[in-house]
Amino acid sequence: MQDGNGLDHLAGERAMAQFDLQAMKVYLAGGQREYEISTKMAQLVANDPVFSKEDRVRLARKDLYKNSLRKAGHAWKTILEKGLSEVEGLKLRHFVDEPTYTDLHWGMFIPAIKGQGTEEQQHKWLPLAYKMAIIGCYAQTELGHGSNVQGLETTATFDPTTDEFIMHSPTVTSTKWWPGGLGKASTHALVYARLITDKKDHGIHAFIAPIRSLEDHTPLPNVTVGDIGVKFGNGGYNTMDNGFLRFDHVRIPRENMLMRLATVTKDGKYVRSNKPRQLGYGAMVFVRQGIVIDASIYLSRAVTIAVRYSAVRRQFGNKDEPGELQVIQYRTQQSRLFPLLATAYAYRAVGFWMKSLYADVMKRLNDNDFSTLPEVHACTAGLKSITTSVTADGIEECRKLCGGHGFLCASGLPELYAAYVPACTYEGDNTILLLQVARFLLKTLSQVSKVRPVGTAAYLGNIKQLSTQNCKVSQGHDWLNTSVLLEAFEARSARQAAAVALRLAKGSGSEAEFQENTPELVESARAHCQLILVSKFIEQLQTGTPEGIRKQLEVLCYTYAFSQLIDNAGDFLATGYVTGNQIALAKEELKHMFDKIRPNAVALVDAFDHTDDYLGSALGRYDGDVYTHLYKGAFKESLNDTVVVDGYEEYLKPVLTQNLWAPHSKL
Ligand SMILES: CCC/C=C/C(=O)SCCNC(=O)CCNC(=O)[C@H](O)C(C)(C)COP(=O)([O-])OP(=O)([O-])OC[C@H]1O[C@@H](n2cnc3c(N)ncnc32)[C@H](O)[C@@H]1OP(=O)([O-])[O-]
Ligand SMILES: Cc1cc2nc3c(=O)[nH]c(=O)nc-3n(C[C@H](O)[C@H](O)[C@H](O)COP(=O)(O)OP(=O)(O)OC[C@H]3O[C@@H](n4cnc5c(N)ncnc54)[C@H](O)[C@@H]3O)c2cc1C
């Protein structure tokens, strides 16, 4: 998609491409229809001045937030006026590209009501939420408790005399703290609180609590609510009103408790349904799968900027070629950049699979089949953890790959990083989530002789073979076999999981021993997730990718798998499955892959189809006209509004005109 001024500084790069660019664009979009919707919505946003990102990093918080309210309101108006479908509306909001209260309203409040509300409750709340007559947020985390959901302190005490719950925040640490959209926008909060009936604590349940007047938006009586303050980075996540909330004995009707999994009757009787209590965590599974799908988009944005800039930027030269060399020619640049490019492709493939996995579990849950829920929980939690950590680090690496100019906000990278990095924490701290995967692996292994593992854990059924047979690679090209690669990742993961399981089995089973082994448990969970990522990329490749792009995808798949193998060589070697020589052979193969990527690199990032508007980067422009736009951009800097800076008279002039020796000067 070219929206520059027509002069293409990267034309030479594009002419080298060896694959069908259009077919790749359609593949990455997830199909022809998705591609068309994406293109249409990207243009709609780019051509609408209300959605402009210009100056975002320079705005003070109040202006930034107000502007974000304006954009969210305009997006909603556009959706209604143009009669956009749900998918189109979602895409439109995606291209507006600002974290805002509607993310939580559509992304968590509504899904939680769908997952945990009875049919009657859904009929009551969803129509209001769908037309945005109410705005909701997801208020789980508290000042003193985030990861440990069972430790939340807010109470919802049932009063049978009035048929109401009394919502209360008994301590400072029980203050709800962090929920997006809560600070200033929401009228309702989905509050996670301890349910108490007849002095008995039944643990954490979800309640819909009105918090602001639908007349004038003021907080309701005995509700204290506001924004928690400025967050990391300019722009970034500061368009979101993450909030605090306290209740002082606030009464809500009994029907406001979401009762699909448990009910409180009029006379205060607590009745649990026979559905697993884990369904109460359903909204988190939903959001985590979405985060995995989005990781590729964020990483591909950073990689697009870094690849295009690396093809424009020249430094040094050699005696064989005239002029300076493009920095993308340097092996060190390639070895940092091309694995990230391959990773963005790998995450797209795993995102496609994640969609089908989620659709499958939803269908099963509707049919009261809960059998795959633990595996889906482990997949969504583990992949959320790995993909967000790698993407956040990847964005930062791309910034460094752009040298000094990467540090300018004009590169688009600092703001992208600031907006993305909290993904490593929200929806579950990444270490906590890997520990959940580790618990799943331990449980699977402990039952392996009785219950055959399925899905992404099926390879653990082969644990004996995977633990005894070693890698047979003897020459570099032996690695160019997806079965050989898969087996390596399976053996490494199975052996790491078995080693830590064995150590724990030999112990007393105490929590202290578990804690002592958490570093190894996290490593084994990471190994399992890396296997899933490699295997799903391979699977996608083998299931009907069009001829015109298959070869390139194959190269990217090998690049991804080899770079994972090499980055984790210590683990692979420690398990004894591979030798140092086999790792060295994989390193050589990886360099061959870089040679194959090099002529296609710019086209491979073009295939992500990010518009200049969406990238918001002088370095990543489609036309490669980097220097003109960096230079022009400097004149928009507010410090340059006047040629003599404000403050000269008061602070600079006295320094320049005192004409006195400083007392400590030796001159
Ligand atoms: C756009 C950004 C907006 C951001 C929003 C937010 O951040 S919102 C705030 C986001 N906040 C967070 O993300 C907080 C992160 N913390 C948590 O998710 C939980 O507190 C916990 C899972 C760490 C511990 O849970 P716990 O104390 O209950 O202890 P436990 O470990 O004993 O687990 C019990 C059983 O449940 C199972 N199971 C667990 N989760 C799920 C699931 N999602 N699905 C299905 N199952 C799940 C687990 O496998 C186990 O099964 P088993 O072995 O009995 O068969
Ligand atoms: C931008 C942003 C948006 C958010 N939006 C929402 C929202 O809309 N709604 C909402 O309810 N919440 C929201 N949150 C809160 C978020 O979900 C929590 O911050 C997150 O779950 C992590 O919990 P915590 O902050 O308590 O971290 P902690 O659990 O206190 O983590 C601190 C450190 O301790 C470690 N740690 C903790 N427990 C263990 C353990 N058992 N073993 C080993 N290590 C451990 C962690 O790995 C981490 O390194 C948001 C957070 C952010 C940053």
Image (cartoon, helix red, strand yellow):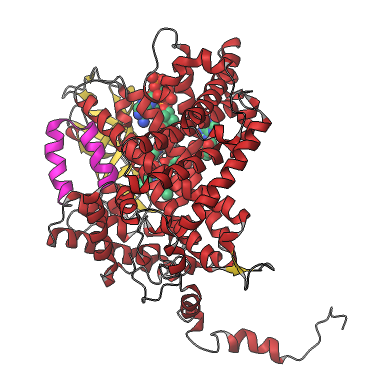
| Left or right, residue 163 beside residue 409 | left
Name, please, the residue furthest toward the right.
666
- Res 88 visible: yes
Quadrant of the rendering where the C terminus is positioned: bottom right
Which residue is at a point 18% across and 28% down the rendered structure image? Answer: 161
- Res 230 visible: no
Q: Residue 418: x, y in percent?
A: 47, 56
Quadrant of the rendering where the N terminus is positioned: bottom left
Pick the residue in front: 355 or 551.
551
Quick check: is 98 in the magenta stretch? Answer: no
Q: Residue 662: x, y in percent?
A: 80, 82
398 shown above or below 342: below
Pick the residue in front: 177 or 30.
30
| Left or right, residue 233 beside residue 163 | right
Dominant SS type (magenta): helix
To which quarter of the image does residue 22 belong?
bottom left
Q: Residue 2: x, y in percent?
A: 34, 68
Which residue is at a point 55% across and 33% down the rendered structure image? Answer: 479
Q: Residue 626: x, y in percent?
A: 48, 72
Pick the residue in front: 426 or 412.
412
Q: Give the magenta range.
A: 106-131
